[in-house]
Amino acid sequence: DVQLQASGGGLVQEGWSLRLSCPASGGTFDEYSIGWFRQAPVKEREGVSCIGVTEGGSQYVDYVKGRFTVSRDNAKKTVYLQMNNLKPADTGVYFCASVLFPQCDMGRSWYDYWGQGTLVTVSS
């Protein structure tokens, strides 16, 4: 099993950047796909991006395309979410999740293991 812990959140102004990290422990990390999810206040958790066992298998929700980039460093057992040109609508708690499968998916039910989230707040 892979245990995850998202980090890197904070309070930033609109237009700024943040890089979230999702280091993993346990399991064979390079066999896991990782998803990034956001939960805004009083809203359901929704998929933002995901990455399969190869970086070519990454996906993004439409409203972050061109602004967010997901990547993985298997040697460090870490997945990153680089978030540029942040907007107030990006505010929420960001979670990473893992599944032992080559392809990723943007649906919550795809993933078996969830880490604790990190709060991102973007002020206008």
Image (cartoon, rainbow, N blue to C red):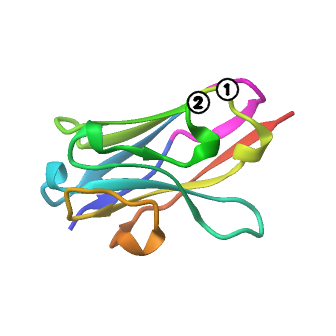
Task: Report which quarter residue 32 is drawn in.
Answer: bottom left
> Which residue position is annotated with label 1?
85
Residue name at image x 72 percent, y 68 percent: 43
Of labels 1 and 2, earlier in sequence is: 2
52 or 25: nearer the viewer:
52
Q: How many residues crowd mark 2 within 10 Å: few (<14), some (14–19), many (20+)?
A: few
Task: Tell me where residue 29 appears, x and y as whole percent.
Answer: 18, 52
Residue 67 image label:
2
Q: Amino acid at mark 2?
A: Arg
Residue furthest front in the image: 62
Task: Tell me where residue 64 appears, x and y as whole percent.
Answer: 60, 39
- The stretch in magenta equals 8-17
Q: Are marks 1 and 2 in contact (CB under 8 Å)?
A: yes
- SS for dot 1: loop
Q: CA distance from mark 1 to mark 2?
A: 6 Å
Q: Amino acid at mark 1?
A: Asn
Q: Is residue 7 left or right of residue 74?
A: right
Is 11 covered by the magenta stretch? yes
Residue name at image x 59 percent, y 45 percent: 62
55 or 22: nearer the viewer:
55
Task: Tell me where residue 17 appears, x and y as whole percent.
Answer: 62, 26
- SS for dot 2: loop
Is 61 covered by the magenta stretch? no
Residue name at image x 27 percent, y 49 percent: 52
Residue name at image x 29 percent, y 44 percent: 57
The secondary structure that most of the magenta stretch takes on is: loop
Q: Is residue 87 left or right of residue 56?
A: right
Q: Is residue 84 left or right of residue 105?
A: right
Task: Tell me where residue 11 appears, x and y as whole percent.
Answer: 72, 37
Q: Is residue 107 left or right of residue 91?
A: left
Q: How many residues crowd mark 1 within 10 Å: few (<14), some (14–19), many (20+)?
A: some
Residue 6 image label:
none
